[in-house]
Image (spheres, helix red, strand yellow):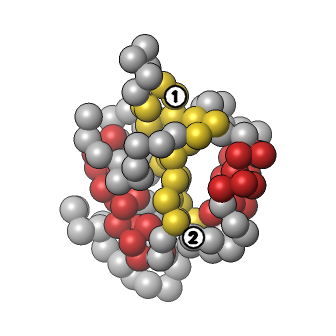
């Protein structure tokens, strides 16, 4: 399976877990998903926040029904690059089908396809 660049750990996608792991105002990436029969994390939805990762993930709790998540904290430029790589590696199985947008005001292009 292609790499998500988020490390080996996955966590329960629950408010209490998000609050314990991610501070308000941190920026970074997240991937929502499930686990297959062998316990391997299967990504289904990718995202990032350039302003508040915790708030972004909390906003998904009511609408996303995936039981697990992975995340990383990082600068918006790095988060954009990771999200682009995740999108290209997993786009056939992701719920979100649109290419990630550049962080507002930066005009970045995807290093893989130029979008």
Task: Look at the numbered disc 1 and give the secondary structure of its residue.
Answer: strand
Is residue 50 left or right of 93 when viewed as pictured?
right
- The answer to whether residue 24 is visible is yes
Residue at 29% across / 46% down in the picture? Answer: 3
Look at mark 2 in the image and give the residue it sits on.
Answer: 27
The residue most toward the top is 37
**Quadrant in the picture for the N terminus:** top left
Picture coordinates of residue 29, whole percent (x, y): 50, 59
Picture coordinates of residue 73, whole percent (x, y): 52, 66
Please state the total of marks drawn on the protein image: 2
The residue most toward the bottom is 105
Is residue 91 left or right of 41 when viewed as pictured?
left
Q: Nearer the viewer, residue 103 or 81?
A: 81
Picture coordinates of residue 19, whole percent (x, y): 75, 55
Tell me the tag on residue 62. Answer: none
Q: Earlier in the sequence, mark 1 or mark 2?
A: 2
Picture coordinates of residue 59, whole percent (x, y): 73, 52
Q: Are marks 1 and 2 in contact (CB under 8 Å)?
A: no
Residue at 43% across / 72% down in the picture? Answer: 102
Snapshot quadrant of residue 66: top right
Tell me the tag on residue 34. Answer: 1
Q: Residues within 10 Å of mark 2 (few under 14, many from 20)?
A: many
Is residue 91 left or right of 24 when viewed as pictured?
left
**Quadrant in the picture for the C terminus:** bottom left
Between marks 1 and 2, how big is the CA–CA gap? 23 Å
Snapshot quadrant of residue 85: bottom left
Task: Look at the numbered disc 2 and give the secondary structure of its residue.
Answer: loop
Q: Residues within 10 Å of mark 1 (few under 14, many from 20)?
A: some
Residue at 47% across / 76% down in the picture? Answer: 75
């Amino acid at each position: 399976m292609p790499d998500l660049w988020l490390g080996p750990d996955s966590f329960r996608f629950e408010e209490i877990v998000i609050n314990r792991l991610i501070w308000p105002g941190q920026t970074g990436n997240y991937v929502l998903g499930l686990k297959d029969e062998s316990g391997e994390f299967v990504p289904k939805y990718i995202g990032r926040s350039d302003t508040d990762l915790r708030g972004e993930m909390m906003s998904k709790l009511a609408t996303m029904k995936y039981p697990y998540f992975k995340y990383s904290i990082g600068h918006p430029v790095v988060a954009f690059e990771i999200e682009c790589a995740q999108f290209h590696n997993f786009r056939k199985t992701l719920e979100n089908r649109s290419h990630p947008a550049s962080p507002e005001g930066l005009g970045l292009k995807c290093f893989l396809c130029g979008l």
